[in-house]
Image (tube, rainbow, N blue to C red):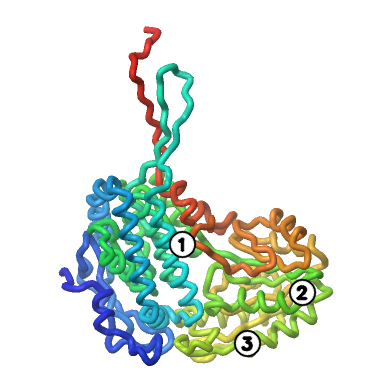
Amino acid sequence: MAQPNPPFELSERRRLRSDTIGDAMDRAIDVRHHIGGDWLDSAGGRTYPKTDPWTGALFAEVAAGDAEDALAAVTAADAAFPAWSDSLPIERQQVLLRAADALDRRRDEVRGLLAAETGCGVHFAEVQLDFCVNLLRQAAALAYAPAGQVLPSDLAGTRALAIRRPVGVVAAIAPWNASLVLAGRAVVAPIATGNTVVLKPSEEAPYTGGAFWAALLSEAGLPAGVLNVVTHAPGEAGAVAEALIADPRVRRISFTGSTVTGRRIAETAGRHLKRAVLQLGGHNPLLVLADAPLDRAVDAAIYGAFVHSGQTCMCARRIIVDRALFDDFAVRFVARAAALPVGDPTDPATVVGPVVNEWALSLLERRVREAVDQGARLLTGGVPAGRCFPPTVLADVPPTSELAFDETFGPVVLLEACDGAEDALRRANATDFGLTAGIITGDPYRGLDLACRLRAGIVHVNDQPVNDQPQMPFGGVKDSGAGRFGIGFAAEEFTEVQWVSARQEPRRYPF
């Protein structure tokens, strides 16, 4: 049944205590579907509990939806599309600017919500908040972006136009790990370009990665049905995603998540002749060349490997160091990693907080143990500490171990020695992934040359791989995805080009 108040208003009444940012809520949040402007229970009446990954306390009771709920959301989005696609530019702009201001005002509350739902620490919460406020403000300008161009025609008396039109309903599937950013990125650009959206958040972040965005934008004046959110229980994403992709009213798929799941989504979308924008996993290298300033390289590597407890797709998974620097680098890097504060994500000093759930914790432990059993050297970490996995560094990891070739989501990094820049390049490219990379060198021009030869969608010279800005073309190559996210590229992904011609005088035909 419909709920009288959206979750954003409920959280306002359960304001976090102001003396401690990120303190627990007084009671759990009720997260429901947001469909056609209403907050609804799932069609089957089922819910599931979402717990705090640090304390284990109940964070939210969440609607456990299915294909029936997904189709209801598509119906609402499809009904809202004609009016929203024809709305005035100023109407779209004002909604997004009001939402940006509201989000900026509620930073303390949102930091606490991110910690309680996903274990996100204070630093990365600020990264997410800054990104999303900027995302909304930059997207507000899309309403006034050029919508097409005049084309030359070889038919005398014909005027030809290429006009960009919104595609219709967009199905957006977002992960948990940077829940505020990745859900926002999935919905804001399509909405700004005149589309309507059905958002399916992860079961690990149904609030900050789903219902929160619906409430924020609704309070900012977004019309009913433009953004709809359907949540589901663990293990039940497939039915919801399949229903969204198969529905003929859905015209574009936006997905961020694992390569395994992205491959299945691409196959399903292909059967229905639908374009999918996919940002998938990464096994990202950081190259430290022989002329790299050592302190700068260690600083970059520590941040790139362990920010957000290593739970971002951009994190440095492999640090490839020139043999001339390897021993000195390893000593400094391992000492810094071992000293990083581990624990409560609401403590501003914490760098490595809890991993998202018990399954993730056991996977990290198993993969590290497998690598060590096969001959890898464990330099620090490797043993869970409560709900956290400490910063873990390994060297000499055999290529047959899962750590060596598969994305491992957590604070685990591999050190690898190389013999010169060309060997570093070869090693960096020897992966099926191609999301992002970093190069640390004393010669930035040589770094740019190497960057152009790295098979990755994103390369940062004299920086580590974890970087993003709303306007940048974010995405990978190879098994790391297809298409580009970013406000500056939204029109290419979420509009269709329509060729329109007009004549004032009759045309002469040959028969």
Q: What's under tag 3, amino acid-wise?
A: Gly
Q: Give how far across and how far down residue 93 sits, in percent.
A: 34, 56
Residue labelled with disc 3:
381
The label on residue 293 is 2
Residue 505 sits above or below residue 102 on the image? above
Residue 139 in view in this figure: yes
Residue labelled with disc 1:
256
Q: Is residue 421 left or right of residue 251?
A: right
Work out whether mark 2 precedes mark 1 in sequence or the reverse, and give the earlier one: 1
Q: What's under tag 1, amino acid-wise?
A: Thr
Q: Secondary structure at mark 3?
A: loop
Looking at the rendered image, the disc whose residue lies closer to the viewer, 2 or 3, is 2
Mark 2–mark 3 distance (CA, rounded to whole Å)? 26 Å
Tell me whether circle 2 and circle 1 mark residues in contact (CB < 8 Å): no
Tell me whether circle 2 and circle 3 mark residues in contact (CB < 8 Å): no
Q: Give how far across and how far down residue 504 sits, in percent.
A: 33, 19
